[in-house]
Image (tube, coloured by chain):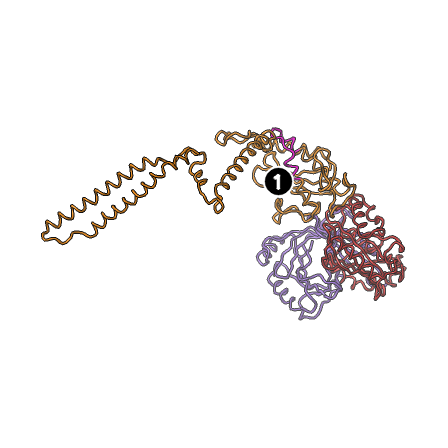
């Protein structure tokens, strides 16, 4: 239940740079995981829709450009996550999607902004690894890697342990500690922390127009 | 805190249009006991659930004429219960064949950082109050009998004062749009509560 | 092998005895033949009876004679020796067909083996008596008959005393919180929460720890009806492993006369799991081995090791 999403480093660090495409890199990663002894356990999907305040409200509220993200995670099928960048993350049930329809006059979804990652779940001992292909519209944009170490509830407690595990299948592409780890020292990790990391990863990938990138989360 | 109705299954994508059918009335404090007694006999749960909720009403003002209203409720007597976010659409009186007021409604259970999040979305708190009362069920019908308390110092729910010398009585059903038949059941039930309380469809516009 | 020889000397007597038995058998059957045939046809009834009785008497006499003869011979044969070390089984050595039925050699081997077993068991019991692993104050080796009827005093401590000991331990370790409950009579159950790392369910009998289960901080430790769940194990492999080690620790920390010291030592040891996910193995220097962090804590130094790295 404790996913740790690791934000990837720069593009050059990523395996995709070795003259392979996204699909081949995903296969490479999953093969390494299988060799390690990880077992396939179904699939997963995380999606994210971007909303911005409709033109009608601009000016009057003075908060133009503020983006709101509404996300879903197949790991929590009855929940819906709503986030602001550097802001609070609301965990709600999926009726929140209905509310967003009602709020159409105030919040509009950005055109073709829907971004998602889909892939396979792997279980290795108490680790849960999810390797996904990030797609935006029709094109594959990058790779997401999520590692969850269920027994530990405080992120900073197990960062070294997690790093060692990541090195075992990512090799030199192992990322640095995500910001979530440093934020609150002994706070109990929650699903919202996972979603924040996915949101940050998606934003990063969005900005890197068309360049294939592997984000490690 | 009002629990989301059981008929409401969570959906993704906002396809299901849920409507709340509502009848309202009120009783004076001294008639409360006899009404509770009557409801005990009529409803499924012999002993009513009591509740003590804090409700905040938030407004989002755009350039449209009417602001967007959301209601955030939290239970004050049940720690750990999720917050309840509620959207209510414009009420429709309908014709004589429909015996209850109908309005669009969306019920959402959320985490406890709801107020912060609504502020971040641009909502501003309009008013708040505390509601204390009893909840009965009869099939899919929900009957709440509660008293509204004014909050004297903003944000301090300990310092309150009763708004009136009466209790508000609401009979409501949440059902998918177009199921006007439920309003017949509601009328029949309301008939059985007479003359203790007269439940009617009250047009809020008339009161403004 | 004097017995064997003496048996050989009497072989003659054996042969005679066997023929005497045969004679006895035939005379006995003649008695019954006579009875079966009944009276022969004679001129007079009186004659018939006389002849039958005379015949019957003759037969009985011969039975008597044969029996006497057999008794005489049996004295000659002598009794089979009873002071053979293997008693009657010693006679198996006389079986000439060794290859087909090697019973005797097998028997000897089994005897030697059981002898040795008894010897080793005796040694082991002596040694174990010195290292009292028994978790009560009873003296080892005291026979069941002489064991005192009353329970050992350490098992009938007043609940108030147990409460005191536990609350003192609770105050000793700020990062550890101990919640004591008594859902079933006087036996206490503890729910120990160690930081934000793990929870331990400890089932006590007086001040002895009977059973312990380790679970994750975010795992449910209660059954549906709200009682402590003392049976189901953790969903995580790492805590299943720690549970095994904790059970080992229960057997290690033993001091029957001072049960409170035992509980305190166990809790001190348990506290070293505070850094379960943060401490690398003291031997191989790594965090993970087969996907598990160092789950073993040395009983003396409290250092972290992987299960397979410990000395």
The chain whose colour is red is: A
Which secondary structure dominates the residues rendered in magenta? helix
Q: Label 1 marks which chain's residue? A: C
- Quadrant for the N terminus of chain C in the image: top left
Q: In the figure, residue C311 lies in which quadrant?
A: top right
Residue B64 visible from this viewpoint:
no
State the image coordinates of residue A89 (x, y, percent, origin top left). 80, 53
Asked which secondary structure carries label 1, the reply is strand
Say whether residue A198 is left or right of residue C68.
right
Crowding at label 1, few (<14), some or many (≥20) Cα neighbours within 10 Å? some
Question: Up-down: is B61 above or below C85?
Answer: below
Q: Residue at x 86, y 55 (%)?
A: A14
From the viewer's side, name the closer residue of A36 and B101. A36
State the image coordinates of residue C297 (x, y, percent, origin top left). 71, 38
The chain whose colour is purple is: B
State the image coordinates of residue C98 (x, y, percent, origin top left). 48, 44
State the image coordinates of residue B51 (x, y, percent, origin top left). 67, 51
Q: Residue C250 lies in magenta, yes or no?
A: yes
From the viewer's side, name the closer residue of A69 and A210. A210
Which hue is chain C drawn in?
orange
């Amino acid at each position: 239940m404790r996913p740790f999403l690791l934000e990837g480093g720069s593009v050059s660090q990523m395996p995709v740079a070795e003259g392979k495409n996204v699909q081949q890199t995903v296969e490479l990663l999953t093969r390494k995981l299988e060799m390690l002894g990880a077992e396939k356990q179904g699939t997963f999907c995380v999606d994210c829709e971007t909303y911005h305040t409709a033109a009608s409200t601009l000016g009057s509220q003075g908060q133009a450009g503020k983006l709101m993200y509404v996300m879903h995670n197949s790991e929590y099928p009855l929940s819906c996550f709503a986030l602001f960048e550097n802001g609070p993350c609301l965990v709600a049930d999926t009726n929140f999607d209905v509310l967003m329809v009602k709020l159409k006059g105030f919040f509009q979804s950005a055109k073709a902004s829907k971004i998602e990652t889909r892939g396979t779940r792997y279980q290795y001992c108490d680790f849960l690894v999810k390797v996904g292909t990030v797609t935006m519209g029709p094109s594959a944009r990058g790779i997401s890697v999520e590692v969850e170490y269920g027994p530990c509830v405080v992120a900073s407690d197990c960062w070294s342990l997690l790093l060692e595990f990541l090195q075992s299948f990512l090799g030199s592409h192992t990322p640095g500690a995500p910001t979530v780890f440093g934020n609150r020292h002994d706070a109990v990790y929650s699903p919202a922390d996972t979603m924040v990391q996915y949101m940050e990863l998606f934003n990063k990938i969005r900005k890197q127009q068309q360049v294939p990138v592997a984000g490690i989360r | 805190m009002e629990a989301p109705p059981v008929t409401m299954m969570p959906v993704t994508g906002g396809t299901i249009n849920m409507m709340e059918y509502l009848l309202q009335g009120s009783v004076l404090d001294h008639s409360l006991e006899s009404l509770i007694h009557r409801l005990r006999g009529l409803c499924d749960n012999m002993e009513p659930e009591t509740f003590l909720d804090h409700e905040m009403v938030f407004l989002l003002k755009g350039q449209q004429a009417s602001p967007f209203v959301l209601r955030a409720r939290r239970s004050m007597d049940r720690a750990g219960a999720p917050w309840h976010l509620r959207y209510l659409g414009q009420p429709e009186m309908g014709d004589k064949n429909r015996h209850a007021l109908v309005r669009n409604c969306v019920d959402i259970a959320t985490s406890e950082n709801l107020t912060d999040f609504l502020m971040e979305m641009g909502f501003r708190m309009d008013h708040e109050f505390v509601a204390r009362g009893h909840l009965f069920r009869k099939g899919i019908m929900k009957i709440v009998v509660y008293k509204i308390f004014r909050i004297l110092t903003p944000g301090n729910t300990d310092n309150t004062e009763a708004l009136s010398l009466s209790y508000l009585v609401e009979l409501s059903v949440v059902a998918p749009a177009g199921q006007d038949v439920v309003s017949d059941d509601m009328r029949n039930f309301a008939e059985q509560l007479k003359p203790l309380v007269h439940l009617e469809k009250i047009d809020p516009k008339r009161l403004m | 092998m004097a017995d064997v020889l003496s048996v050989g000397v009497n072989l003659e007597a054996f042969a005679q005895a066997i023929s005497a038995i045969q004679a006895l058998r035939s005379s006995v059957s003649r008695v019954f033949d006579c009875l079966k045939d009944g009276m022969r046809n004679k001129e007079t009834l009186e004659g018939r009876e006389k002849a039958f009785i005379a015949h019957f008497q003759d037969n009985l006499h011969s039975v008597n004679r044969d029996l006497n003869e057999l008794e005489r011979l049996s004295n000659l044969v002598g009794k089979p020796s009873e002071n053979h070390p293997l008693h009657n089984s010693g006679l198996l050595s006389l079986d000439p067909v060794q290859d087909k039925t090697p019973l005797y050699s097998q028997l000897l081997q089994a005897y030697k083996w059981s002898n040795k077993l008894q010897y080793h068991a005796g040694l082991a019991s002596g040694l174990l008596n010195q290292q009292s692993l028994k978790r009560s104050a009873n003296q080892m080796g005291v026979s069941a008959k002489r064991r005192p009827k009353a329970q050992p005093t350490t098992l009938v401590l007043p609940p108030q005393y147990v409460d005191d000991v536990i609350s003192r331990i609770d105050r000793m370790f700020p990062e550890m919180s101990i919640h004591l409950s008594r859902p079933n009579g006087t036996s206490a159950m503890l729910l120990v929460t160690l930081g934000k790392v793990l929870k331990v369910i400890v089932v006590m009998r007086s001040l002895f720890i009977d059973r312990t289960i380790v679970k994750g901080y975010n795992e449910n430790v209660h059954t549906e009806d709200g009682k402590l769940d003392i049976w189901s194990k953790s969903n995580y492999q790492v805590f299943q492993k720690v549970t095994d080690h904790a059970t080992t620790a229960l057997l290690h920390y033993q001091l029957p006369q001072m049960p409170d010291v035992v509980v305190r030592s166990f809790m001190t040891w348990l506290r070293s799991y505070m850094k379960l996910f943060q401490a690398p193995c003291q031997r191989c220097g790594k965090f993970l081995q087969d996907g598990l962090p160092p789950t073993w804590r040395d009983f003396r130094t409290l250092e972290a090791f992987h299960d397979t790295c410990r000395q």
